[in-house]
Image (cartoon, rainbow, N blue to C red):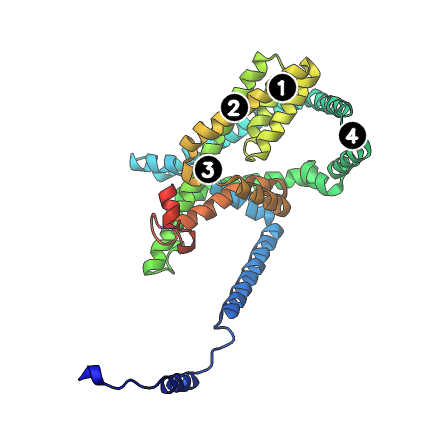
């Protein structure tokens, strides 16, 4: 019988659909695509304002914030050593004292090495680098295409004004106030580091008290990932910097380039600034080699620097730091630029590890090995990988 049932006419169906649409409540202004976009824009503006407020507060209390951040970094870097000693029955206080003394001795030895290597030969290093730059500029004038000498002079003048300005001097030239602030910050960092090493797990459990259920599990994953990523990054960067400095030192000795020790020390320090630091160290070593031994030797120095950096980036860094913490070069450059603009030299040093920590948190947001939904690779990307 259903085969012979009469179907309703199209105009009746259309009229019923119009009546049902008329009965529905009207959509709100925030329910369509443009409204959702506006909501996201407002959320982003609020987050940016919150971030600016946090940065402003940290800058105002930098005497406390900087030692706190540095103490957290060192505590994360030496967390495996503390865990190993605790597992083998070493009392917490004794393990803390041993670790703290080790950190203080390492920092003191590094500071002494920098002062010893750079202080006595800094004038020679600066003069040779300046003379090498002048030779490079003179050679550039012989190229087929013209380079405006006036523009070069303006760049050098701007650089000189920046170095001699009160803003740069207040942060880089150690006056009485700067020395007092440094000593206060160093003592405060040691005190905070002592408590982080000794009572760090208890402090973290106290911070986790407000969380329950899935939120508590996520907070624990974030804390564990932060300690692992930050500690691995600092330990790996220090090891890579040491290998870079030793490799370039051997290359400079083989090529008979003067001032090999201060150049190697600068390589070690600049290695904590990814990409940019290695470039600056290579340029400085090449300029010294250009003045001392001529253009061919300078080219060989550049080749040695590039070779060491390639070996470090392709073999040593993935082993020491892991490929999961390897950030794209574009992200590193953006982080360095933002960190320098916000925090100066300290911001330059901390920008990349903080970015690595943020990306590590994203990777465990929804589970131990489950990134946030928006950060998960698509099936096609998984097949390509």
Residue 70, percent across and down? 52, 41
In what element is the residue under mark 4? Answer: loop
What residue would you read off at disc 3? 233
Residue 135, percent across and down? 75, 21
Of pointers 3 and 2, the one earlier in the residue sequence? 3
Disc 1/disc 3 C-alpha distance (Å): 32 Å
> Which is closer to the viewer, label 3 or label 2?
2
Compared to 213, does 296 lie above or below? above
Q: Can you say which quadrant of the picture contains the N terminus?
A: bottom left
Label 4–label 1 contact, CB within 8 A: no
Disc 2/disc 4 C-alpha distance (Å): 34 Å
Disc 4/disc 1 C-alpha distance (Å): 23 Å
For the question of whether residue 106 can be seen, the reply is: yes
> Which residue is most to the right?
150
The disc label shown at residue 146, or none: 4
For the question of whether residue 76 can be seen, the reply is: no
> Which is closer to the viewer, label 3 or label 4?
4
Disc 3/disc 4 C-alpha distance (Å): 45 Å
Residue 89, percent across and down? 29, 35
Of pointers 3 and 4, the one earlier in the residue sequence? 4
Of pointers 2 and 4, the one earlier in the residue sequence? 4
Label 4 neighbour load within 10 Å: few <14, some 14-19, many 20+: few
Residue at 45% x, 33% y: name it: 235
* Quadrant in which residue 281 is drawn: top right
The disc label shown at residue 261, or none: none
What residue would you read off at disc 2? 308
Compared to 12, does 367 lie above or below? above
What residue would you read off at disc 1? 299
């Amino acid at each position: 019988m259903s085969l012979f049932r009469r179907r309703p006419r199209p105009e009746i169906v259309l009229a019923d659909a119009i009546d049902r649409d008329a009965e529905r409540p009207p959509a709100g202004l925030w329910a369509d695509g443009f409204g959702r976009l506006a909501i996201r824009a407002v959320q982003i503006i609020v987050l940016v304002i919150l971030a600016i407020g946090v940065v402003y507060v940290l800058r105002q209390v930098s005497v406390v914030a900087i030692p706190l951040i540095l103490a957290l970094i060192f505590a994360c870097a030496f967390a495996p050593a503390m865990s190993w000693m605790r597992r083998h029955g070493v009392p917490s206080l004794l393990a803390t004292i041993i670790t703290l003394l080790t950190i203080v001795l390492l920092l003191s030895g590094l500071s002494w090495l920098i002062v010893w290597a750079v202080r006595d030969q800094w004038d020679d290093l600066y003069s040779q680098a300046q003379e090498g730059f002048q030779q490079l500029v003179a050679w550039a004038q012989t190229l087929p295409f013209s380079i405006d000498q006036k523009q070069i002079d303006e760049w050098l003048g701007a650089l000189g004004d920046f170095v001699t300005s009160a803003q740069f001097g207040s942060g880089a030239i150690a006056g009485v106030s700067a020395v007092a602030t440094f000593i206060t910050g160093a003592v405060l960092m040691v005190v905070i580091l002592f408590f982080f090493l000794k009572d760090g797990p208890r402090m973290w459990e106290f911070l986790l008290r407000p969380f329950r259920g899935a939120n508590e599990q996520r907070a624990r994953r974030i804390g564990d990932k932060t300690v692992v990523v930050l500690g691995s990054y600092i330990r790996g960067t220090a090891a890579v910097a040491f290998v870079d400095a030793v490799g370039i030192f051997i290359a400079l000795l083989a090529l008979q380039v003067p001032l090999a020790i201060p150049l190697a020390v600068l390589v070690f320090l600049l290695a904590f600034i990814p990409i940019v630091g290695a470039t600056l160290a290579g340029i400085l070593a090449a300029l010294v080699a250009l003045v001392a031994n001529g253009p061919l030797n300078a080219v060989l120095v550049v080749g040695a620097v590039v070779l060491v950096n390639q070996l470090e980036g392709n073999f040593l860094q993935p082993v020491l730091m892991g490929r999961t913490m390897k950030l794209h070069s574009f992200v590193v450059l953006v982080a360095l630029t933002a960190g320098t603009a916000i925090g100066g030299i300290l911001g330059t040093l901390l920008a990349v590890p903080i970015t690595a920590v943020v990306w590590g948190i994203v990777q465990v947001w929804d589970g131990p090995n489950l990134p946030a939904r928006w950060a998960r690779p698509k099936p096609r990307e998984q097949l390509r990988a």
